[in-house]
């Protein structure tokens, strides 16, 4: 089975440049469908989720060219169908991002209803309620959601629950609606802000992004532009935590410290030495790390995507840590694997209790989802002896050549198979 072979015990030292953010790149690729003419993106991460989104766009007739090292050109002027294939959409929840742009520009979208994923149930009711508020008809048939509207009209949309996906989809749909749309209780994630900035550069009129109230004044058309994706805060956080846990000294460059304040605050509380500059963050690991209480919540709270990776660090902390996961119901699938490395963890419902141990010991483990994979790799880096982390199909969805990045910091890790 393909896996990462890791010999633990080396402290990570050095610098890395952050790749572009997966969760900004995917909706921005979908939003490129809104533009007349070519959209030229830079800093697009070379991860399998980007490959899946490229295939989805191609399957409906868009032109997508990717050079594999950051540059991508998308042209959505000659769409041949508004129906996206299940085989591709089912591979990734973010595929549903194409619904809003197709509805806005082509008056119709047919997208398979996302099923659950390894993190739990992934409903899209908030996306669909938002589309309805803009005047779309929503129906469902044979596993497909169909949204249709001759013209969209701006409206007030209140989200009873903060959702990154619903905020992005409704924001994209509203760019070409007639009149003003107000999104209330909108998501404030940096990737939502980046999508709004991208849409504005294409000619949209969006304000308030980054706050809970986003206003969108509809325009009649959007045009192609050049745009650089923001740095990935989850990747930045993963490598910083790896540096801290291994007692190393890691600097992430071309990143944005403001995006990860919730993490750097926790690292400081855990006795780690953190320094930041305009576009860099440095962590020097100190042992022992102190135990923490961490509760995931929407931005600017602690990101759920870093919860498993923070848990990896806390397995060796002095004392008992408590984690509360408030976003996804199956986000502790990695705990059994972490126990195989010697972690002392106990889960009840949304709470995970971690009693710090003296050491972890290498073992074969399997990643159950993307960030759980990141967490197991980070834990294996400090585990005595050898570990084999499988489940690369998940890790490669979010981490571009993770082994190369870690080798450049001095880790003993290689890809097998
Ligand atoms: C995005 C991120 C993901 C991150 C998550 C939370 C992408 C591609 N993925 O996922 O990495 O972990 O934000 O920060 O950007 N919900 C509903 N109804 C809906 C939509 C969501 O009940 O219509 C629920 C979800 O089940 C979940 C919560 O709301 O419990 C948050 O989901 P959401 O913010 O929409 O996450 P995603 O956009 O799917």
Image (cartoon, rainbow, N blue to C red):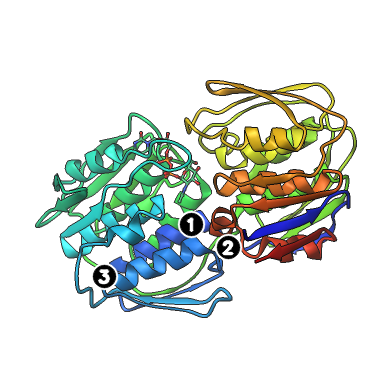
What residue is at 53 percent from the left and 21 percent from the top? 349
Residue 60, label in figure: 3
- From the viewer's perspective, tell me whether residue 60 is left or right of residue 279: left
- Label 2 within 8 A of ligand 1 by Cβ: no
Query: Pointers 2 and 1 in contact (CB under 8 A)?
Result: yes
Residues packed near mark 2 inside 10 Å, few (<14), some (14 to 19) or many (20 plus) = many
Query: Pointers 3 and 1 in contact (CB under 8 A)?
Result: no
| Residue at the spot of label 1 | 24
Give the CA separation, mark 3 to mark 1.
21 Å
What residue is at 32 percent from the left and 34 percent from the top? 159
Residue 279 in sight here: no
Where the N terminus falls, by quadrant? bottom right
What residue is at 23 percent from the left and 78 percent from the top? 78
Residue 20, label in figure: 2
Q: Earlier in the sequence, mark 3 or mark 1?
A: 1
Q: Quadrant of ligand 1?
A: top left
| Residue 194, x across and y down, in percent | 48, 56
């Amino acid at each position: 089975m393909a896996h990462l072979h890791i010999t633990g015990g080396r402290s990570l030292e050095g610098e890395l440049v952050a790749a572009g953010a997966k969760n900004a790149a995917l909706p921005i690729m979908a939003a490129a469908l809104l533009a007349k003419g070519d959209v030229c993106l830079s800093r697009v991460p070379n991860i399998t989720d980007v490959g899946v989104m490229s295939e989805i766009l191609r399957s409906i007739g868009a032109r997508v060219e990717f050079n594999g090292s950051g540059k991508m050109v998308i042209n959505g002027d000659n769409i041949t169908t508004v129906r996206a294939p299940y085989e591709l959409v089912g591979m990734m929840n973010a595929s549903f991002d194409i619904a809003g742009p197709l509805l806005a520009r082509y008056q119709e979208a047919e997208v398979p209803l996302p099923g659950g994923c390894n993190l739990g149930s992934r409903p899209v009711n908030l996306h669909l309620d938002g589309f309805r508020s803009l005047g779309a008809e929503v129906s469902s048939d044979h596993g497909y959601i169909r949204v249709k509207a001759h013209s969209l009209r701006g409206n007030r949309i209140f989200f009873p629950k903060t959702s990154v996906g619903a905020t992005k989809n409704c924001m994209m749909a509203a760019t070409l609606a007639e009149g003003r749309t107000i999104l209330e209780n909108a998501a404030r994630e940096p990737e939502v802000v980046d999508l709004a900035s991208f849409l504005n550069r294409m000619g949209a009129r969006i304000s308030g992004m980054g706050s809970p109230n986003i206003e969108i004044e509809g325009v009649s058309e959007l045009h192609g532009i050049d745009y650089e994706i923001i740095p990935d805060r989850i990747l930045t956080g993963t490598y910083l935590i790896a540096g801290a846990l291994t007692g190393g000294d890691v600097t992430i460059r071309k990143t944005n410290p403001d995006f990860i304040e919730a993490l750097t605050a926790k690292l400081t509380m855990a006795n780690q030495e953190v320094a930041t500059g305009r576009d860099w963050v440095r962590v020097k690991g100190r042992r022992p790390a102190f135990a923490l209480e961490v509760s995931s919540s929407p931005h600017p709270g602690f990101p759920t995507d870093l919860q498993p990776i923070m848990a990896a660090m806390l397995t060796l902390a002095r004392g008992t840590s408590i984690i509360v996961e408030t976003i996804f119901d199956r986000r502790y699938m990695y705990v059994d694997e972490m126990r195989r490395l010697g972690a002392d963890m106990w889960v009840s419902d949304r709470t995970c209790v971690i009693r710090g141990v003296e050491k972890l010991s290498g073992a074969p483990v399997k990643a159950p989802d993307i960030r759980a994979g990141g967490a197991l790799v980070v834990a294996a880096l400090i585990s005595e002896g050898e570990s084999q982390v499988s489940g690369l199909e998940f890790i490669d969805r979010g981490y571009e050549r993770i082994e190369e990045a870690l080798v450049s910091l001095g880790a003993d890790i290689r890809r097998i198979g």
